[in-house]
Image (cartoon, coloured by chain):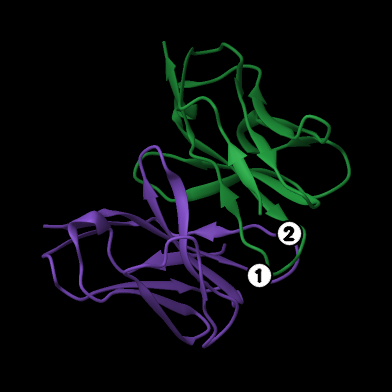
Chain colours: A green, B purple
């Protein structure tokens, strides 16, 4: 079984500052990794994913994440945030078997202020 | 664009009522999922379905059942609603192979009084 830890439940940041949202996972098998974003009163939307290949993954809205196998981490970063990035961010892991399910972290609320 | 729709955005029911939450996807996805989302707990999987008439229990199936009679539709049923089932319910669908992306509906906020 796999699990996901998002240690920061809330991250406050000023507009145009950089941000990193942390995600660590545990799994005994190879995994796929995902970051989803949830804007207020909406469902989840995929930001980016790591399936294989380059460990630096670029997603929508200027976000990127780096897969670090030795540290079992998949931290999300953005060099300069905007007010519109205020949302809840979920990290998720899935083992590489096609029939397996996603396991989500508890989420990090990013609050961007002026 | 893939679209996952849920029958209601907001729902208020009374304790003991039978509640149906409907989810429809329009991209012929084999897999469909029901989650509940609670503050501080993230998303927890209730049930999922690999294909028509197939279902598997997720992490928190107690108090829920599901039905998948057609490929595009996945229903979540609360046989006898209780106040601890007040939550946000999210449906998702995914193709069985390929890029592994799950597409989510907008959610149904259920309040049980």
Relative image position of residue B1 (x, y in whole percent) = 57, 62
Relative image position of residue A52 (x, y in whole percent) = 85, 48
Please give the chain letter of the residue carrying mark 1: B
Residue at horizontal 66 percent and vertical 17 percent from the top = A79
Tag 1–tag 2 contact (CB < 8 Å): yes
Quick check: B87 above or below A112? Answer: below
Q: Which mark is residue B99?
A: 2
Q: Quadrant of residue B98?
A: bottom right
Q: Which mark is residue B47?
A: none
Q: Secondary structure at mark 2?
A: loop
Please give the chain letter of the residue carrying mark 2: B
Q: Whole-Å distance between the Cαs marked 1 and 2?
A: 8 Å
Label 1 crowd (10 A; few <14 / some 14-19 / many >=20):
some
Left or right: residue A79 compared with residue B113:
right
Nearest to the observer: residue A18 or residue B41: B41
Identify residue for label 1: B95
Q: Secondary structure at mark 1?
A: loop
Nearest to the observer: residue B38 or residue A43: B38
């Amino acid at each position: 079984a796999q699990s996901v830890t998002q240690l920061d439940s809330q991250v406050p940041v000023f507009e145009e500052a950089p941000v990193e949202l942390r995600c660590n996972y545990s799994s005994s098998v190879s995994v796929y990794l995902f970051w989803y974003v949830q804007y207020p009163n909406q469902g989840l939307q995929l930001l980016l994913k790591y399936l294989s290949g380059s460990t630096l993954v670029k997603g929508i809205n200027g976000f990127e994440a780096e897969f670090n196998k030795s540290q079992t981490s998949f931290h999300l970063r953005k060099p300069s945030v905007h007010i519109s990035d205020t949302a809840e961010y979920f990290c998720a892991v899935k083992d590489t078997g096609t029939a397996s399910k996603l396991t989500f972290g508890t989420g990090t609320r990013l609050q961007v202020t002026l | 664009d893939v679209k996952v729709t849920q029958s209601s955005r907001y729902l208020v029911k009374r304790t003991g009522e039978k509640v149906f939450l409907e989810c429809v996807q329009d991209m012929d996805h084999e897999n469909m999922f029901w989650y509940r989302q609670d503050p501080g707990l993230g998303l927890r999987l209730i049930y999922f379905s690999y294909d028509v008439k197939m279902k598997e229990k997720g992490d928190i199936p107690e108090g829920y059942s599901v039905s998948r009679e057609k490929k595009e539709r996945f229903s979540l049923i609360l046989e006898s609603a209780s106040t601890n089932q007040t939550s946000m319910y999210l449906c998702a669908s995914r193709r069985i192979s390929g890029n592994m992306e799950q597409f989510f509906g907008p959610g149904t906020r259920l309040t049980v009084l």
